[in-house]
Image (cartoon, rainbow, N blue to C red):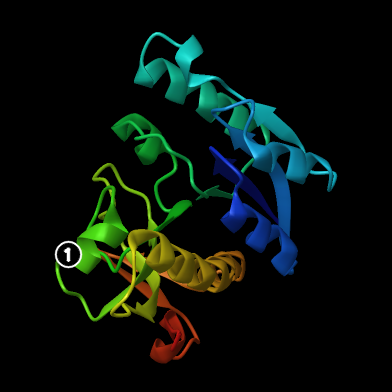
Amino acid sequence: MKNIVILISGRGSNMQAIVEAGIPGARIAAVISNRADAAGLAWAAARGIATEALDHTAYPDRPAFDSALAAVIDRHQADLVVLAGFMRILTPDFTSHYAGRMINVHPSLLPAFSGLHTHQRAIDAGCAVAGATVHFVTAELDHGPIVAQGVVPVLPDDSAASLAERVLRIEHRLYPQAVRWFVEDRLHINGHRVEVRDVEPAARALVALD
């Protein structure tokens, strides 16, 4: 059994997708937020999952907050840390501490459009497709080794909001699968590439036609 700690800042829809997937061999040990009013905390607590809130504004700087956050995560003996809409840039010491056991989902086809405003940037660039990427977290923002990607079309009348909704739907399929692979010990980082043992390459690229 692997202990999973999920970090959120809001409603945590990806957290909900992972919990509801009921991944064999995974125990959701805790859901932690940097915002006490995050809606996802109440959702998790209602399902008997331990929850904690650490207000980042109560700490003098980013390293102090990250140190406190790591102490809470480690108290739950996390085998895997899952970022699910956790809106904090993490310090190098924090990412190093969880190297190889912390993943994130980013709403673009990395390495394209790292950072914010990904959907509008994809539309403005005239992309025919957009999507999401699950990757291991490193000190370089949105540049960790890629586990899997999901692709959706960019439609002629798309707004950033409509594209975001379509991308989020594929995130909800992609992220639980990536967590499942980690729990099953299928993921191996080789340099900057991730090898997924006993999984067809096509399974790492989900495609939505709508």
Percent x, y of residue 194? 35, 70
Q: Could you tell whether 53 is left or right of 141 in the image?
A: right
Percent x, y of residue 165? 48, 65
Q: Is residue 35 above or below residue 160?
A: above
Quadrant holding the C terminus: bottom left
Q: 49 or 79: which is nearer to us?
A: 49
Q: Could you tell whether 50 is left or right of 35 in the image?
A: right
Q: Which residue was labeled with disc 1? A: 124
| Amino acid type for the residue under numbered disc 1 | Asp
Residue positioned 53% across, 27% down in the render: 69
Percent x, y of residue 42? 75, 38
Percent x, y of residue 37? 64, 28
Q: 10 or 84: which is nearer to us?
A: 10
Residue 78 appears in view = yes
Furthest residue in direction front, as rendered? 157
Residue positioned 50% across, 11% down in the render: 58
Q: Quadrant of residue 76?
A: top right
Quadrant holding the N terminus: bottom right
Residue 112 appears in view = no
Q: 183 or 152: which is nearer to us?
A: 152
Q: Is residue 103 above or below residue 22?
A: above
Residue positioned 53% across, 37% down in the render: 9
Q: Quadrant of residue 90?
A: top left
